[in-house]
Image (cartoon, rainbow, N blue to C red):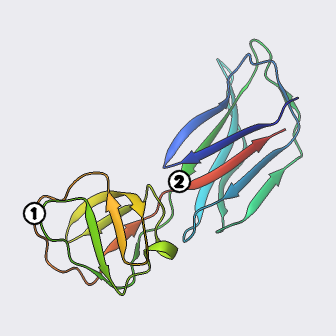
Amino acid sequence: MATLHHNISGELTQELLAPGSGLKVSKISLTNTQKVSTCKVDLFIKKALKGKFYLIKGVELPIGATLIYDDITFSNATGEYGLYIKLTNGPTFTLTGSIDVTGTNLNVPGTNTLFTSELSIGDEVVISGETRTIATITSRTVATVTAAFGSDLANDTTPDCNPTALVDVIIN
C-alpha cells in the first residue's frame, strides 16, 4: 500500500480513508505539531449500519509527540470500513506580554510578546474581548489576523490564545 499523509488542523472530525478505497491499513502514525499545546485525538473506523469502532479515544498527544498505532489490520474495500479522526483543541492560555491594537486593521502589535514561540497560524487570539484568527507571524512582536479589528482596543495586558490542534497523520 502507498503511504498517505494528512496535515490536519482545527477542532473537527475528518475522514482519512473513504469506505471502498480498497486499501489495507497496517500502521497509523499521529504527530502533534502544535508548538504550545496538547490536543486530544479519537481515531475510529466506521461502517454504515454497523457503527463506530474506536481504535483510540480521548488520547492526549503532548507537544511534539508521535503516537504509532501498529496493532491494526483492516480493509476498507467496497462496503467495508472508513477511517476517521477527531481532533480536540488544547486549553486556552494567556500570552506573554501585551497587545495594543490601534485602528481597524489586521495588525497585532505586541510588546514583550513571544509570538514566534507561543502562536501558530490558525490559532485564535482574544484581545480586549475580540476574537481573531492568526494569519501570519513575522517576529516575537509582529503578527496579523485574518479579519480586521473593529476599532481601537484598550491595551490588553492579558491577551488569550485558543490554540488550534495541529496533527500530522501518516497511514501505511
Near mark 1 (Cα within 10 A), the count class, few <14, some 14-19 or many ≥20, is few
Q: Position of residue 82 (x, y in %)?
A: 70, 26
Above or below: residue 137 compared with residue 170: below
Work out which residue is located at the far top of the displayed protein and give it: 78
Q: Is residue 74 left or right of residue 10?
A: right
The number of numbered discs placed on residues in the rendered structure image is 2
Q: Amino acid at mark 2?
A: Thr
Gap between marks 2 and 1 measured at Cα: 31 Å
Which quarter shows the C terminus? Answer: top right
> Is residue 158 or residue 73 the one in the foreground?
158
Mark with earlier residue (2, 1): 2
**Residue at the spot of label 1:** 151
Image point (68%, 43%), residue name: 43
Residue shown at 36%/67% (left/top)?
143
In the rendered view of the protein, which quadrant contains the N terminus? top right
Q: What percent of the width, then of the height, locates residue 50?
A: 69, 22
Q: Is residue 14 above or below residue 86?
A: above
Which of labels 2 and 1 is toward the front?
Answer: 1
Residue sitting at the far front: 138
Q: Where does label 2 land, which residue?
A: 88
Q: Is residue 7 above or below residue 159?
A: above
**Label 2 crowd bin: few (<14), some (14–19), many (20+), radius 10 Å:** many
- At which x and y percent is residue 6? 66, 41
- For the residues bearing labels 2 and 1, Cβ distance under 8 angstroms: no
Q: Is residue 80 above or below residue 154?
A: above
Q: Is residue 151 left or right of 74 when viewed as pictured?
A: left
Residue nearest the observer in this picture, 144 or 150: 144
Residue type for callout 1: Ser
Q: Position of residue 118 (x, y in %)?
A: 48, 74
